[in-house]
Structure formats: C-alpha cells, structure tokens
Amino acid sequence: MRYMATYDLMETIRNTNQWLGATAAAMGSYPATALFPSPVFQLMAAWGEVTERSFHRMVVKPDWGITSVVAEDGRDHVVQIEKLVERPFGDLIQFKVLGRPEKARRVMLVAPMSGHYATLLHSTVASLLPDAEVYVTDWHNARDIPVSEGKFDVEDYTLYLVDFMRHLGPDINVVAVCQPAPLTLAATAYLAEIDPEAQPQTLTLIGGPINPDAAATDVTDFGRRVTMGQLEEMAIQRVGFKYDGAGRMVYPGLLQLAGFMSMNSETHSKAFADQITRVAKGEASDHDKHNRFYDEYLAVMDMTAEFYLSTVERLFKNGEIAKNEFIVDGHRVDIGKITDVAVKTVEGTKDDITAPGQCIAALDMLTGLSDDKKASHVEEGAGHYGIFAGKSWRTNIRPLVLDFIDQNAGRHAAQAAKRKAAKKGKPVAVKAVKKAAS
C-alpha cells in the first residue's frame, strides 16, 4: 500500500463522494420538485447536504472558534492566537486575551498527535481561558510538510516539547492529554537531567498510556497482535501529488478515520441517518449538536510514518517508557530524576482507550519525587473524551487541576525570575530572586 496511487485513490473516493453529495443536494432542492407531493426529493437533498458536508470536513482544519472571553471586569475581551515558536512539524501558540491583566496561572496544553488536530481540545481551552494564560502545541498535518524538512518520530516529538517548555519558563504548568502523556513525562525527565532550572512547575497527565500493559484495551490488544511489518504494509502510504508533502511516508488521516468509524459503526450510522431525517424535516441547523461534533471528529490529519510506527513499537510493544528505558537523542531518560515537579494523573473508570491503571502507573515510576508532590484522580463514570473535554472535565476535573496548580504555585518563581532576566540580558539581584520565590 506504500504508493502515491493508493493515497490519491482514497482522496479521489473522498472527493467523488463530496461531489455526489453536492449534486444530490442541488437536484433535490430544485423549485420544480415542490410540485410533486413526495418526500423523495426532500430526502435526496438532505442526504446530499449531510454527505457533502461530511466528506468536505475530512480535509479541512477546524477553526478554534474562540474569539472572546469574559474577564473579571465583566467585559468581553478579544482573544488573539499568536505563534510563539514556529517549527516545521508543529508550533507553540498562545491564546492571548487582549486588554486583560496577565493571569498568574500559566498552562501549556500538550495536544495529541493521533489523527485529529489540536482543535480537538477546543472546549478544554475555552474552559481554562477565563482563569489562566493558555498555550497549546499546534501540530501540523504531515501531508503539508515537504520531504526536505526531514523525519519526525517520538524522539523529535519529545525534543519539541523540551524546547516549548524551555521557551515558556519553569513557572509553566503542563497538561498532557492522552497520547502525548508518556512523551511529556519523558521530556520533563530529560529537562530534569539536562536543564533542571527549565523544568515545569507542575505536570498533569490525563488519560495517557504511560504503561499500556497495566490494563488491557482493544488498542493494546491490537498492538500485541500485529507485527511491525504488517502494520507498515497496512497503514503506511506516500502522500499524493496534490499536497506539499508529496512523497512523504505517512499514516493517512482518511485511513485513521476509517478505523475510528469502524470501532463504533452502528452508533455512527444511526447518527448520520437521524441527521438526514432532521435535515429533511427542517429541524437541523448549521451548528446543531451533530454538526458541532462531526465537524471536529471528521477533520483528520496525516501522521508521519516514523512517528506512528515508533509510537507503536517503542511505547506499546517494547514499553520503553514504562520500563524506564526510553532514549532521546542518544541520552537514556531516567524518570526517577524528576524531583522538583508536582505530578498529577487523571483517569476515567469507563475509558476504553486508556483504561484506568495505565496513566497512574507514572506515579510509581517517579521514585525521586516525594509523595506530597504526587496526586491522582479517577473520575467515576467518565469515558476517554469526558475526562478532558466533556461534562466530567467541566464539573469535576477542571477545578481539581486548577486547585493542584494553585497548591504548587510559586515553587519555581526564583527560576522563572532568573530566566526572564536572562532573556532581557539583565542580571538578577539575589533579593529579587528570593522575593519572587517567597
């Protein structure tokens, strides 16, 4: 399957279905069809509208849709997205609230690179923004990155996180969601050894596979059954001629989406059938519940082949982070070297992607961290999505995470003051550093 023709065939099928949907919507909406007392044309137009929108969303990066936030003064303040660090495979962005005094809480959200864009964390960002300065890792679609930019695997991902943390300073509070949790833990440990004063203040790991063997799921079972050769043959393709990354080896977003949908095919089929009926009856709207969810869910991005394959082989099959044997740029990372970062884990009892036990395993690996700097929470009845973006996040988990950040606030103030002064090229007075730390 590792051919451009296969990639272009998938794109052709997607494009054709989008065209069929648009055609059906146009034909079913002709004024003349109103002369015939039959629901056929209404259903045709409805099917076309839903189909065209769905297949179009598959190649569109969703907008964050966060334009303003209400501050303590009761006014709406404009939110501006700024790129702080730009890299070929991902940027560090800030949601800057204009005209609002800077918040003491500073949160860096590490978004997953697992098929969807960072905008999957839209509701997470929106919920944190009133109470914190928010930064997000905005990963790029591999199909748009020229081959000349080189490779990007789990080690490169980890080093990107190291650079992002260094840029934000030691008073940053890092929150890693799902897939990046083990690599964020490794990046923190890397800093603990290489640049201790750049370590984050707190680290919150939400539903991440730190030790995939701690609790089996369909994901971990699949990782054990399939060989790397089979996986490469089944999943990897070369980007077609339509995109800037032509020739790059990737795990295509469309192929990933097919896997996502097949896991709950009956649920998705019913959701689309119900939406077609609602559209035909005139009960649907552009931003109804169905469209809000699927506009994001259907928007998928390609992953570089080396990132996907190294994730499966090194993190799931070999369990390098779980065994504390992960190597980054020739350096063996020791999780036990983390001694000055407060760490919290969050899990959901109904998480079928990262089952309870996989994430909390990080706390046992932190042998150099005192118990008073460790915390964990298991949310009863919460699924994977719910622990970072659903009702459970909004009502229970978000307040707990903010409290955890507040409880550990100021511990890295001295290091932060030194870093800020160094950036400005000014020496820091000892008294000023002690005052910042107090």
Image (cartoon, rainbow, N blue to C red):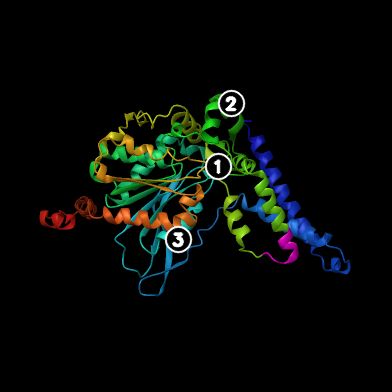
Q: Residues within 10 Å of mark 1 (few under 14, many from 20)?
A: many
Q: Secondary structure at mark 2?
A: helix
Q: Secondary structure at mark 3?
A: helix
Q: Residue at x 70, y 66 (%)?
A: 283
Which mark, residue 230?
Answer: 2
Residue 337 image position (x, y, % from top left)? 26, 35
Q: Which corner quadrant of the image does residue 417 belong to?
A: bottom left
Query: On the picture, is 289 further left or further right than 140?
Result: right
Which mark, residue 70?
Answer: none
Distance between the Cα atoms at labels 2 and 3?
Answer: 40 Å
| Residue 279 counted in the magenta span | yes
Which residues fall within the magenta stretch?
277-284
- Front residue of 22 and 413: 413
Mark 3 or 1, nearer chain start: 3
Distance between the Cα atoms at labels 1 and 2?
Answer: 19 Å
Residue at the disc numbered 3: 126
